[in-house]
Image (cartoon, rainbow, N blue to C red):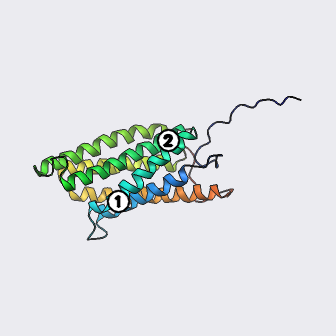
Amino acid sequence: MVEREHPPAPEAPPEAGVAAGGDPLIVALPIFAVGSLALGVALIGALPAVTLGSVIPIVLLGTGLFLGVVTVWAAALGQTMVAGITGTFSGFWLSLGALLLGLTHDWYGIAGTNAAAVSGTQELFFIAWGCLFLFLLIPVLRLPAIYPAIVGLVVVALALGAASAHTGNATLLKVAGYVVLVFAFLGFCAFVNVGLTAMGAKRPSPPLGAPLIS
C-alpha cells in the first residue's frame, strides 16, 4: 500500500513547541535579556561606579555576537521571521557596542571635536534604529503579545534616547533606562516560557499572550 504524502507543516509560532532542530529562542531570549538588563542598570545609574562603557563586554561579545549565531541557527531551520528578528537585534547590539567603543577611544574622530558632535552622533544612532524597530513592530503584531510589547518598548527607549541627545536632558536617558529594564524583564519571562515548553510543559507560565493581530 502506498502511503499518502502529507504537506509540510507550517512554521510554528515561537510558543507552539520545539521543532526537530531545536528552538533558537532558547538562546536568543536570555542573551537578549541579560544585555538589556546590563544596559538598563548602567543608564539609570543604579551602580554609581558603572559607566556605559562597562556594558560593552556584555552587549558586544555576549548579546550581539550570540544573537548573530542564533540568526544562523534560525535561518538553517527555515524560521524566517525568527531569523529576521534576531538578526535585527544582533545588528543593534553589535553597533551599540561599536558606538560605545568608538566614542570612548575616539576611533571615529568625533569625541575629540565637541560635545555637540557626540550628541548628534548618538541622536542619529537612536533615530536610525528607532525607525527600524518601529517598522519591525508591524509584522511582530502577529506574534504572541509579549513580543510586540518588547519591540514597542525598544522603540520608546530609543525615542527617549534620541530626545535626550537632542536636548541634553540626562533625565530622559535615565527614564529610557527604566524602559530598558522593563523589556529586559519581559525577555526573561519569555525565556522561562520557552524553557518550560522545551521541557514538555503543557501550560508553561508566564503566558506569552495572544497575538494582537491574528
Would residue 141 be seen by someone viewing this image from the given angle? Answer: no
Q: Which mark is residue 57?
A: 1
Are the two marked residues, 1 and 2, in contact with CB atoms closer than 8 angstroms?
Answer: no
Q: Secondary structure at mark 2?
A: helix
- Please indicate, yes or no, whether residue 91 appears anywhere in the rendered image: yes
Between 210 and 143, the residue placed more toward the observer is 143
Amino acid tagged 1: Pro
Q: Nearer the viewer, residue 82 or 211?
A: 82
Where residue 83 is drawn, which disc sits there?
2
Which secondary structure lies at badge 1?
Answer: helix
Please give the name of the residue rendered at 26% of the width and 56% of the height, measured from the top-left corner.
Answer: 172
Counting every numbered tag in the picture gives 2
* Left or right for 12, reference 145: right
What amino acid type should be assigned to the residue bearing mark 2? Ala
Q: Position of residue 152 (x, y in %)?
A: 41, 47
x, y percentage for residue 118?
A: 17, 49
Return the mark for residue 167.
none
Residue beneath the point at 43% across and 55% down: 183
Residue 26 location, x and y as percent?
Answer: 55, 54
Q: Earlier in the sequence, mark 1 or mark 2?
A: 1
Name which quarter of the figure residue 121 lies in.
top left
Q: Which residue is drawn at the image coordinates 61% and 49% (left, top)?
A: 22
User: What is the C-alpha distance between the residues marked 1 and 2?
Assistant: 23 Å
- In the figure, is residue 36 to the left or right of 208? left
Which residue is the extreme one toward the right?
1
Q: Nearer the viewer, mark 1 or mark 2?
A: 1
**Percent x, y for residue 25?**
54, 50
Quadrant of image for the N terminus: top right
The residue drawn where x is 39% and y is 61% is 37
- Crowding at dot 1, Cα within 10 Å, few <14 / some 14-19 / many 20+, comes out as few
Determine crowd level at label 2: few under 14, some 14-19, many 20+ residues with C-alpha closer than 10 A. Answer: many
